[in-house]
Amino acid sequence: MPVIIKTIAIIGQAHPFHSGRDLTLQRLGWPDFSEGRLELLQAILREQTRTILSHDSQMTKRPSSASGASDFSV
């Protein structure tokens, strides 16, 4: 399961730049992804991907909360 979660997280971080391109550019105040902007975006996504992949993939179960629901952490 952790591999699937990591995969979704990695894909998800790039999703706004593809499917929501116009809104993303508007929010950033950029006319496009040229002039170094694409390189900046790629560097940030690479850094975040490395961080996602570097985390321990073992999920540990913590004691149940007062509501009876189990809490999980990575």
Image (cartoon, grey):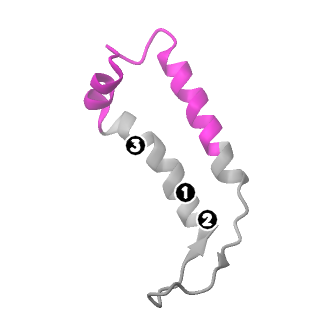
Vertical arrangement, residue 37 with respect to residue 48, above or below: above
Q: Are marks 3 and 1 in contact (CB under 8 Å)?
A: no
Q: Position of residue 32 (x, y in %)?
A: 35, 16
Q: CA distance from mark 3 to mark 1?
A: 12 Å
Amino acid type, label 2: Val
Element under disc 2: helix
Q: Which residues are magenta?
A: 20-49
Residue placed under numbered mark 1 in the picture: 7
Is 65 drawn above or below residue 30 in the view shown? below
Q: CA distance from mark 2 to mark 1?
A: 6 Å
Indicate the quadrant containing the C terminus: top left, top right, bottom left or bottom right: bottom right
- Circle 2 sits on which residue? 3
Q: Farthest residue to the top: give it.
A: 35
Residue in the image at 54% along x and 78% along y: 71
Quadrant that contains the N terminus: bottom right
Q: Main secondary structure of the magenta part?
A: helix
- Image vertical order of residue 7 relative to residue 23, above or below: below
**Amino acid type indicated by mark 3:** His
Q: Write down the quadrant of residue 50 in the picture.
A: top right
> In the picture provided, is 26 more to the left or to the right than 8?
left
Q: If you read the primary sequence from the N terminus, does the residue marked by circle 3 or circle 2 appear first? A: 2
Question: Label 1 near label 2: C-beta < 8 Å?
Answer: yes
Marked residue nearer the N-terminal end (3 or 1): 1
Q: Residues within 10 Å of mark 1 (few under 14, many from 20)?
A: some
Queried whether the magenta region covers residue 39, the answer comes back as yes
What residue appears at the point 58 percent right and 75 percent down from the top-left corner?
72
Residue topped by disc 3 = 15
Which residue does the image show at 47% across and 8% down from the upper left? 35
Q: 45 left or right of 51?
A: left
> Which amino acid is tagged 1?
Thr
User: Which element type, helix, strand or loop, lies under badge 3?
Assistant: helix
